[in-house]
Structures are given as C-alpha cells and as structure tokens.
Amino acid sequence: MDIGIPQTSMVRLGGKSTQRTAPFVIHDLQKQNTGRKRTRADWIIIDHLKSSAEHYYQRLVQDFEAYKRQKLSYDDLLTHLEFDEPEYFEAFTVPPAEEGMITVWSKGRAVNKHYLLDRWIRGQDAGIFKSSPRVLETVEVWDILPSLRKDQLAKWESDILKEQVENIYKISKDYNSLIDQLMREMNASVTAILKSKRIIGCTTTGAAKYSNEIQAASPNILLVEEAGEILESHILTALGAETKQLILIGDHQYAV
Amino acid sequence: MLPRETSHQYRELAQDPAILEMITALSSPTAKAISYKIKNVLATYNSPDYVGSDYHPGGRHDNDFADFREIAIVPTADEITSLQPPFLRPSEILDDPNTKQTRLATHLDNQFRLLREDMIYEMREELHISLGKKKGHRRGLVIDDFKFHSVHCGKDVKRCKWGIALECQHDFPQFKQVEPKNRRKYLIENPKFLRHLSQSSLLIDGDVVAFPTINRDEDLLAKDPPIIVVQLDGEASVTKTLLKLKTATRIQLIQIDCAMFSYEPVLKTLQNTKGLSLSEELLFWVEDSAIGSPPFQPQDIIQAIKQDPSQNIQSLLKTSKPITLDASQASSLLSGLTQNVSLIQGPPGAFPPGVPSSIFESTPRNGKVFHWRTSGKGSS
C-alpha cells in the first residue's frame, strides 16, 4: 500500500482494522455494494431454498411435537406394532362388526379400535372377544403375564422414541444443509467482491471465517507472512483449486 | 460443488482405471488437464489400509471413524471422556516412500486429526475446570434446572440452523437488578454473558451428553423465565441428547471457554478438500529435484533484477516510492517470482515492507493474490 498499489484493487478480511486499512474491510465494501447485484436467477435459487427450508421446518416442528408428548398415544403404538411386531398387531386388531352393526360391551359402550390393546396393557383378557377366532389364534400374546406386559410396553416405548429421534435427526440434518446453502447464496456478494479484487489481505481468523468464499474466488498466488506462526492445516485450506504459486515468508526460529 | 454423500457414486465411476486411461490417452491438452485433476481428487480419498495393525483409526468411541470425513467436528461426550489415546500418525509415515500412493489422503487426514486434537485438548481442559475436577482461575457459568421447551429455527423471515430451546426454571441472577423492560437492553450491553456461538456442555441427570453451541437470541433470553437456544451437530450428539432429554429430571448447562469458531471452518474445509494444488511440491518433493515454475512470471522484472540486483526498481514496478533491494532481498524476490513454492526465511521486520509487496506488484494483472498476515490482528 505504501508503495502505491491502488486502493480499489485490495480487500481485507479479518477482525480489527487500523485507520489505514479501514477502506478495504469486507463489511464496508459489502455495504457499499461494490459487488454485483443479485440477478433474477439468484433470487429464484434463494426463494427455492427458502421454501424448501420452510417445508423441513414444518416437519421438524411436527416431529418435535410428537416427541414432546408425555404419553404415548394408542394410535402411535398400533402404528409401531403394525410394522415392527406384526404378531402383536394381529392380536390387538379388533374384529370387524357385522355389517350395519356396532359391537358393544358393558353398559352399551361401543367397542373402539383400541379396545383389545387397552385390555392387554391393563393386564386383562380379551374381554368380549375372548372366544373370537382372532384371539384364539394369537393365544401366545394373550398368555403373557401381566407383569411381563409392562416390560414389553416399556420396550415398545423406547423403540418408538428411538425411531422418533432417528427421524428428527434425519430431517434436522437436511434442514441444516438447506440453511447452509442458503447462507452461501446470501454470501455470494462476498465472493463477488473477492473475485473483483487483485489482492485479498487476510488474518488467520478471517481466512477461516471466509474459507468457502476464498476457495470460490480461487486466488492464483498465496503469500503468507510470518509463516512460522501459522499451522500447516490453515495454509492447506487456503490453497484454492487454481493456486499456482505459494510464497511463505517467516522465520521458524522466531516466536516458537 | 456436490456434498460428500452424493459425490460418492461419481468417485466410484472415476476410479475405474479403464475410463481414466481413456481420458489420459486423449491428445487434447484440456482432456489431459482434466485427467490429472481427477487423479488428484481421487488421491485425496485414497486412504491406506490398516489390516494387521492394532493401532488404527476408528472404534475408540462414538465419534472415531477410519474416514476422517465422517468425524463430527464438535466432540461427543464419549470422546471427551474416552481414556484411549486418539489416532495420530508419526511423521515418518508421511515421508515413507512406500506409502506414496496414499500420502496425499494420509496427509489431509493427519492434518485434520492434529488440528482437531488441539481443539479437543483445549475443550477438555475447560471442561475439567468447569466440572471442578481441575483447579482453574475461571469457572464457567453454570445454569441449573431447565425444561425442554421446543425446537427453535429462528424467525420465519430469517431462519437459522435448528436448535433446542430450553426454558430455565429460575430467572438469571444477573437480571435481579434489571427492570423487566430493560432485560433485552442488558443482554445487548453485555454480549459476553452467554456469548453468541460460544461452546457449552449439556448435562442431563449429572452426565455430560453433548457440547452444544449457544445461539444467542436476545428476545428469548429476555423472557421471564429466560429461554436458551442451543445447537447440536453430529448424529451421535443429537441422538444421545434427544434420547436422554425425554426422561430428564435435571438439565444443566455449563458455558465453556473454547475458541471453536477458529477451528471449525478450517476442519470443515479439510473434510471437504477435493484435490490439493501444488501437492507435487508440498508433499512429494525430494531433495535436489527441480521446483516447478508458475505460469505467470513477469520476465522483464526478473531479467532486470538478475542483471543488476541493487538498482532502484521503482520504475519497473511503477510505484510511487523508490525501492532498492540488498543482495539477499533480491535473491528471495527472484525465487519468489520464479518458483511454484518458495520459503523465505527471516523474522518480522528483517525485510522492509517493500519485499512482499514487490512480489504482489510484480505479478501480472491476471494473477489474483491472496495475502495473509497474522501479526497482531487478533489471531488466536
């Protein structure tokens, strides 16, 4: 700078700045909007990412609601059994009433689809369906001792929780990767600024923070001062695909 | 750029030697360049076998994998408490001529593990201090007694990464002297209190389950009782936390002081590295072999300095101030201009500021320079 390199060809990434380096700080350049403006195509990508993220967000909220529910619903339990424990599902499926009829039990209450499951969990027998062919076929399930039924239920609850958590993880991962893409799109102006400059000045923290953007801008020459203080991994990550030259300046015996 | 998972199928295809040979055999220079690029990319995935060896990566805990790209950056609770030493290679393996085939991949893998170990060491120290197992001058802020509140993804106009919102059962002691309407203001004026993106450790029923990052949402923190949002990363941490959270009776959060933000981007970039430029010079150089030269060299300047190293090069570089170099500066400038990779030794200040800048200025207009300084710029 002191030897007269024009200001407009430099940009600076990183924490503090002095009065002299202030005109090159990336944030200010972004505000001045010296990078390119977003095109229609950019907005289409951004809108698309936003709406996909919103979709995953809704699913995440739903799944967390189910996760948060204190008591397991009979519906959730039956769904789980249908896929994972078919013999139990068979045993708890209430036989259909004859056409036009409703099966009732004591005091004329209608039998709902949870009738058998509920009785089994309470440690009771199959009640009004005791002698129905379906119950007789699944006698092993109905023979389980009431005390063991509690353990079985606890196992199902934990299996269901595991499934829920696994599902939440998958959705949350997809959601986060959409947010990542969205942020990269929003940061495209940084890449544009970096691309438009001839010299990118940078600190270690700045290089780490903008590593994606620097890689995208793909500098041809990497010049490192005080190389003795920088870890090799930091230098490797600053080498872009197009880097053709690396100059390291520093003293390995200094400030070890 | 494709994410790692989806690029896998293409890598398999590229690994077919017949296809690669076909591309290499083509006479067009573009095709040749592409084939070298493919080879370079593949080499970064070419991890060595550990058959027959007891000491190998993977299997120590729930975040130890043979492929470093699968390792979650933020450590898991199992990992921090694991007593087994981590997998790190001695440096001679990287120089061994017999492992040349896998050197690039091994080198990246090792750089990742070394840097990550630095970070974990720092975290482990902090954690031990915060749990009172080790004496230290600071004890992280401990917030006791939470209830799981909801999932948090920011406001709909500005979504952020997902997190878990935890509702404190008691108000913060920090708010005691603060009027209800000034709570948000207090948080904005004290950014260090539950600092944004700082690391924490989450304890459920007395056990550390994960190390979430605090996502500072002033609106939620200002509520009475306050709500803290923490973000989790990695399958092991997410599943462990959610499985335990469901039945938790006591949830605690301890703030730990670790500069994760300076490690994380570098580690992530290492995981996503596909091909490394200048790897011939950096990893496969043997003594006395020639170093390649960069495609853009300012011949007029190089010739002039070769002829008379002590001349004033102001007019050559078109700078506003005169620059003269001494013999060693001139020779380092020449090597900097003519070699692919050059290492110039000297403590800060031994060179006038002109030398590195000369290198910039001697570069033709089509070369983009990435200039990196560390001195006194808040580097960590």
Image: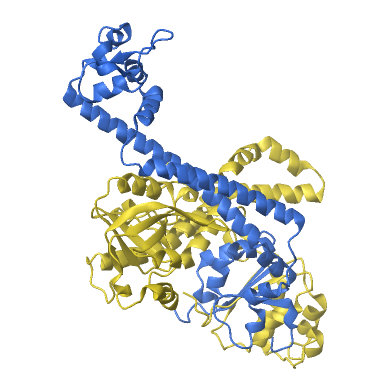
Chain colours: A blue, B yellow
Q: Give left or right: position of B58 versus B20.
A: left
Q: Is residue A213 above or below residue B183?
A: above
Depth check, front residue: A107 or B81: A107
Q: Residue furthest front?
A: A107
Q: Tell me which residue sits at (28%, 31%) in the image.
A: A155
In this view of the protein, can residue B64 be seen by the observer? Answer: no
Q: Position of residue B127 (x, y in %)?
A: 30, 64
Image quadrant holding the N terminus of chain A, namely: bottom right
Give the total of numbered labels: 0
Quadrant of the drawing holding the C terminus of chain A: bottom left
**Vertical position of residue B106 compared to residue A78: above or below:** below
Q: Quarter of the image holding residue B291?
A: bottom right
Residue B130 in view: yes
User: Residue A234: x and y, percent?
Assistant: 53, 66
Please, is residue A108 above or below residue B100 in the view?
A: above
Q: Residue at x 51, y 45 (%)?
A: A58
